[in-house]
Each structure stands twice: as C-alpha cells, then as structure tokens.
Amino acid sequence: MLSTMSLRHALLGLLIDRPASGYDLMKRFEGSLANVWPASQSQVYTELTKLAADELITVSDTGPRGRKEYAITDAGQIELRQWLTETKPTRPARNPVLLRVFFLGVLDAEQRADFLTDLAQHAAGDEAALRELRESIDWDDTDLSRYGRIALEWGLRFTAMRREWAEWAATQLPG
Amino acid sequence: MLSTMSLRHALLGLLIDRPASGYDLMKRFEGSLANVWPASQSQVYTELTKLAADELITVSDTGPRGRKEYAITDAGQIELRQWLTETKPTRPARNPVLLRVFFLGVLDAEQRADFLTDLAQHAAGDEAALRELRESIDWDDTDLSRYGRIALEWGLRFTAMRREWAEWAATQLPG
DNA sequence: TGATGACATGTCAAAACTAGAATGTGCACT
DNA sequence: AGTGCACATTCTAGTTTTGACATGTCATCA
C-alpha cells in the first residue's frame, strides 16, 4: 500500500457529498477534479471495486442497467480525514517542460526561440480558458464551490507565472 | 511506445554532453535533473539497457568493477532533437495539494487554517532552498548551466506563487 | 418500430514507477 | 593486512497508469 493512493481519496471526497455511481463520479470528475487529478474510466471503476472490498464505501443502491450507487462508510470518512491532515514531504513533481529546457542547447537559435514563444502562447491560452471557466460556473455556497474557486485561482496564478517566465526566458537566450 | 518516455530523453540529453556510466548519470541527475524529473537508480539502469537495445546509445568503453560507459549514437541524437521540437498537447498534471484543497470542507476551521499555513511555510522553505542552490552553484558558460539557470528561475517563481497563493487562500476561508 | 445516443460497467495487456534487496569490486588509509 | 567506503550493476515483486476493447441497457423520437 503506497502513501499516494490519491484516486481513492478523490473518490471518497466526492462521495462524502452524496452517494453516486461510477458513471456519476466520472462526470463529476470531468467538471472539476479532472483538472487536478485526471483519471480514466477504467481507473475509476477499478478503484471503486477496491474501495468497496476495503469497506471504505458500500453499494447503497442499485438501479437500471446494472447501476450501482456507492456511499461512503464511517471507515471511509475516517480514511479521508486522515489523508487530508497527514502532512506530506511532497517530492518535486515531474516537469516535462523544464526537462526540455535543460536541453535547449541542442537546438538552434530559431528553434529555441520558437519553443519559448510556444510555451508563452500555450500558457496564455490556458489562462484565458481558466478565466472563461471561472465565468461559466455559477458559484454557490457549497464547499466544493468555495474550494473549487480557490483551486481555480491557483490555476490562474500558475498560468500567469508560466507565461511571464517564458517571456522572460526568451530574453535570456544567447543572441 | 508511449508519447512520454521522458527518462530516456533525460538520459540522452545528459549523454550528448559526454559519455558516462549509469553511476555517473545517477550522480549528474541528482545535481540538476532530479528536480524536474526524479528517477530511481533501478529506473536509470533499466532504461540504459533499453536504450542500448534500441541502439540510441552504445557501450563506448568498459572499466573496472564492470563499469560500462555509454555514448549517444547518431540515432539517439536524432531522437533527442525530435523529442525536443515535437510540441505536446500536455494534459494537466496531477496536483495532490489541490486535490486536498477541494475537500478542505471536510476538516474543521482550525485544521483548514493549519493546512494553508503549512503550505505557505513549505513554499517559503522551498524558495529559500532554491535561492541557496542558486548561490551555491558556480554558473559557467556551458549549455547545461545556462538553461539550468533558466529552469531554476522557474522554480523560484513557482515557489513564490505558491506561497502568495496560500497566503491569499487563508484569507478566503469562512470566518 | 427502429435507430440513436446517453447510460453503465467491466476486462485486459503493456508500460512505467516504486522501493528496496542482493551482489560484488577497487581504492585508500591505517 | 584489514577495513571501510565509494564505485557499479542487476533483479524482484508489487502498484499504478494508460489506452483500448467488450458488452449491454434504457429512453426518446422520428
């Protein structure tokens, strides 16, 4: 059992709000959590089966088309709280962009400049998309809404930082 | 063959500078790339074997204690350049911190505040460590040095952003 | 009634990653 | 001569992730 196991906690966190089926969870994922913890369909169903086996969730209801609605158990709630409060030493995340930056010397001057221009433009695009997302959501008073907004702000600041850095980096290239 | 495969490119990138053994590469990793692409010892050796099998690198020399020195081949150089210029659709990265933020509502007010204070402090600590790293390195005129500096600046801006965001987020918590 | 599309779950193989154990060699110093 | 450390590689076992494939059901509407 690894210390990460974050998909399970993402699912537990969604289920603490209200019971849901795998299909429901997939859709709720897309709206919010997919931005911070992408997961495929097969992963979600596999993890739900495991969570049920570990009795952190139970099948609370069944519906048409074999629908299974899951609800979080007491043990699941405890597990979720434990995970939330456990402070992690969080090792540095992988960064494919910076990995490329390290080896920019391999390219010629024009390609290098293009690379950074591309990054700046992508960041600007992401920034615009997040702004649009912020406008499109009707923020209510629920927890998920409040904390989702805070997470979105992180994204906005991050994209701004990436854009500014890429623009600065372009000025640092050898003439 | 997946589109990522970034460890191979990290190794190719290091080998383009000069030939090295697995052991050498591990050490060079620790100094620089480990910050943007952590890899374990077993991963490095496994990948070197595969790279050699794919003829992107070859054993250029052998030494005491079974040492095998690898050199990049022409095919390897082509592969590296290709990877560097290929523009990636780059899906959103996993973010365990933000995942937790989404579920902060589960905790009580004090725990929530502690959580964000912790984040701010960790970010501040990381920022200080990076500043120290920047001072401790003797930056020369090599490519790795120039681009390493640019990557480090990314880290500095990122940690600053994280700290500022965590401080701001604390002001957004419900009274 | 037939087609379509949303609903709904599941299985599989391959690749990647984690975490460590196991094994041994050569060098330098006392 | 002995000892300890840096050098150096390999293997194993388990977990996670990816990406696809397979299978079937229900509701709606033309």
Image (tube, coloured by chain):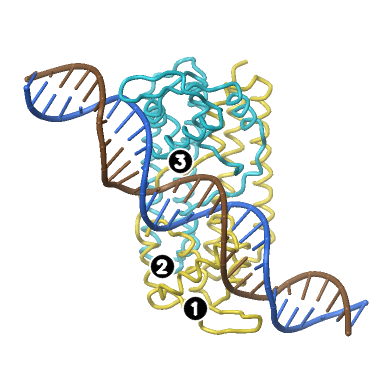
Chain colours: A yellow, B cyan, C brown, D blue
Quarter where residue C29 is shown: top left
Q: Which quadrant is home to the C terminus of chain A?
A: top right
Q: Residue at x 41, y 56 (%)?
A: A4
Q: Answer few, some or many: residues within 10 Å of disc 1's Cα (few below 14, many 20 plus, some between 14 and 19).
A: many
Q: Residue at x 56, y 28 (%)?
A: B55
Q: Answer few, some or many: residues within 10 Å of disc 2's Cα (few below 14, many 20 plus, some between 14 and 19).
A: many
Mark 1 touching mark 3, by CB under 8 A? no
Residue highlighted by disc 1: A71
Q: Amino acid at mark 3?
A: Thr
Q: Chain of mark 3?
A: B
- Secondary structure at badge 2 equals helix
Q: Residue at x 53, y 77 (%)?
A: A18
What's the distance in space between the residues labelled 1 and 2, CA to CA? 13 Å
Q: Which one is closest to the eye, mark 3 or mark 2?
A: 2
Q: Which one is closest to the eye, mark 1 or mark 3?
A: 1
Residue highlighted by disc 2: A80
